[in-house]
Image (spheres, rainbow, N blue to C red):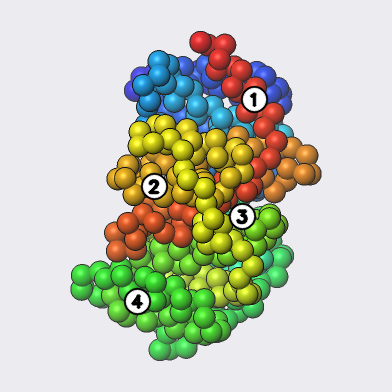
Amino acid sequence: MATMLHADTTPLLEAVAAQDTAATIRETVRLLGARNVKPAYIAARVGIAALWGNARPHALSVLGATGQVADWIRAIPLGAESGDEAHRVYAAAFPLAQGFLAVADSVGAGLREPHPSLPEPLEPADIKHPDGTHGALAEAFSKRDVEQIRRILLGFYATGTDYRHIQEAIYTTLRFRYPTNGFPLTFALSASDVEDMAEWGDQTPALIYWFTPLMVDQSPDTPAAQAAQAFAAQPNNDLSWLRKRLSVPKEEAAGAEFQRAISGGNATAACSAVLTALKNGATPQGVGAGLALAAAERVNAAPTGDRAALVRAGQLLRYAHAVHMAMLHTQAAQIWPLLYTAACAINEAQPGAPTGGVLAISASASAPLGGLIPATMLRSLDQQIALGDLGSALATARRYIQLGNAPRGLVGALALAASLNDATGSADDALAAHALPMVTAAAAEYLALPAALRSGGQNALLAAGVRLATELRGGHSVADQVRAAIEQIG
């Protein structure tokens, strides 16, 4: 533990700020060699500087994923070959280097320039709005008043309130906000992921500074947001009654029938399906998980070979994941209408007639390679993804789970494959740069599913994760340099 807390990350930060790829990779590998240094700790030091340096949101999304991914990578089962354990430790350098280089252009400003001045906090006790803090925040949001939003959020921080209250305030403000692709809620989760790695505390103002301008982004809401708000405004559709429910959760109410109802009919029917699932015993967290499964079906229905459509569906999955995480972060009734908005967004993205996708590919899958040894199976999966052999990759992943192997190792392999893509590359690789945050969202949802929704591990999220990792491949110049640096260690 002492090594973790006192590891010298200064050379790494200087290398990232200088946008020196070779030095960044070298210092990342060096830090990973100190066994007690958690990858998330390393990522946090870079991430906080990137927040203060006003990192590009999509770049921060890559960095925000790295802590989870590095943790999953270390769950990949070891084989019999010598050096496997060391390779697994150093493999975290692949996602970390991608995340660091993605935000490198902002880290220099975050480190070398004085932190931007923030306004005086407006503490909750000093807010005179008739609807309290949330009402004052909603008013500032409607006026696109960044400074007032910052004052209110800093007021929570100044009083020593738990950071979850800041998240709650953000989620409440965004509960009926859904522009195309679901930003800014997904960016709020990315910033929260960075703060989680930094353990919040005195780093919280960095999130408040960075995220507030994204809250007031002028992108218009889609009809999904408007439909959700209209549905929630009806007295019979209020969800505050959930606070008093004492019955045992029945998460199966957010199962296959619920997911079909989300996809069928119109936005009102989708919202009604949410309400029905909650009344039938599902918790908001269970409904969030069911919505993620429905969003994963959109990924799986994207036409084969249409990477742009796949990325659009992947962004929807990221939004559904952010909504589910919001349900897990706070139990406040004010955020529950996010479930309506997510249902409408998924409904709005209804696919047309089937034109391919995972189901068609799975039907013609070749036999998976690798036998029954978990480590060998995952090596085969890695090769199949690298070759773009989606059918075999799906078959191998499903077989791995069917044999009772731990899912964390599988998602680690998928996320590692996605982290080989250059996060900052040519225009041709721009779509591939989205792979890591999307695969991470699918994997995190897969691991977080309630038992009643897992379907023995053979569900839409597993297929979506494999498909995103396999089809969104791009350049791998950074990964090649990371591999060379690891080999030099021996």
Q: Nearer the viewer, mark 3 or mark 2?
A: 2
Q: Residues within 10 Å of mark 1 (few under 14, many from 20)?
A: few
User: Taking the image as drawn, is residue 163 in sight?
Assistant: no
Element on which disc 3 rests = helix
Q: Residues within 10 Å of mark 2 (few under 14, many from 20)?
A: some
Q: Which residue is mark 2?
A: 399
Give the CA distance from mark 4 to mark 2. Answer: 34 Å
User: Is residue 130 rendered to the left or right of residue 351?
Assistant: left
Depth order, front residue of 402/178: 402
Q: Are marks 1 and 4 in contact (CB under 8 Å)?
A: no
Give the CA distance from mark 1 to mark 2. Answer: 30 Å
Q: Which residue is mark 4?
A: 278
Give the CA distance from mark 1 to mark 4. Answer: 49 Å
Of all residues, the one furthest to the left in this rendering is: 247
Give the CA distance from mark 3 to mark 2. Answer: 45 Å
Instruction: Find residue 420 and report its image quarter.
Output: top right
Element on which disc 2 rests = helix
> Mark 1 or 3 closer to N-term?
3
Q: Amino acid at mark 1?
A: Asp
Q: Which residue is mark 3?
A: 212
Q: Amino acid at mark 3?
A: Thr
Residue at (40%, 89%) from the top-left corner? Answer: 236
User: Is residue 324 rendered to the left or right of residue 184?
Assistant: left
Residue at (72%, 65%) from the top-left corner? Answer: 218
> Mark 1 or 4 closer to N-term?
4
Q: Quadrant of the N terminus?
A: top left
| Image location of residue 150, percent across then percent down | 58, 55
